[in-house]
Image: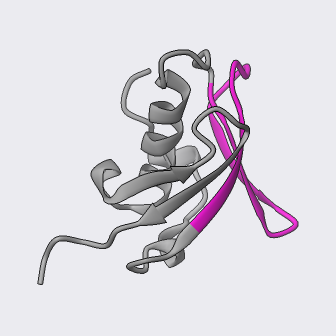
Amino acid sequence: MGKPKSKNLPDLTYLAQAGAEIAVHVTPRAARNSVLVRDGQLRISVTVVPENGKANDAVQRLLSTAMGVAASQLRLTRGQTAREKLFVYLGSSRS
């Protein structure tokens, strides 16, 4: 998966608050990459297969692009092998 294009992603910059926990429902092996906010729940679909952390990496990159932050500022804290995942935004390293 290449670098996600932000033109087709919703604006999730409001989630970029240091320490924010972001719950995500993930669908791997989807037809296309997408980020949807439906009924207050964040749903991310990726085309990557869920093996060796590839889908987790793709979700992290897609989420970070939609949030307008670096992927390294997001940490997957729960759900490494589940569809329900919890990311934490670490915040910018700038002071």
Q: Residue at x 39, y 56 (%)?
A: 74
Q: Is residue 94 left or right of residue 37?
A: left
Q: Quadrant of residue 5?
A: top left
Q: Is residue 66 left or right of residue 9?
A: left
Residue 40: say if magenta. Answer: yes
Q: Horizontal and vertical percent for residue 42?
A: 71, 57
Quarter of the image where the N terminus is located: top left
Q: Nearer the viewer, residue 93 or 9?
A: 93
Q: Residue at x 46, y 48 (%)?
A: 6
Q: Nearer the viewer, residue 38 or 28?
A: 28
Q: Horizontal and vertical percent for residue 95?
A: 11, 84
How many numbered tags mark residues here? Answer: 0
Residue located farthest toward the bottom when viewing the structure as drawn: 95
Q: Is residue 93 above or below residue 59?
A: below
The part of the chain drawn in magenta is 22-46
Q: Quadrant of residue 38?
A: bottom right
Q: Residue at x 55, y 65 (%)?
A: 11
Q: Residue at x 43, y 77 (%)?
A: 19
Q: Horizontal and vertical percent for residue 73?
A: 31, 59
Query: How is the protein colored in the picture?
Result: one colour
Residue located farthest toward the right when viewing the structure as drawn: 39
Q: Quadrant of residue 70?
A: bottom left
Main secondary structure of the magenta stretch = strand
Q: Horizontal and vertical percent for residue 84?
A: 73, 47
Residue 68: say if magenta. Answer: no
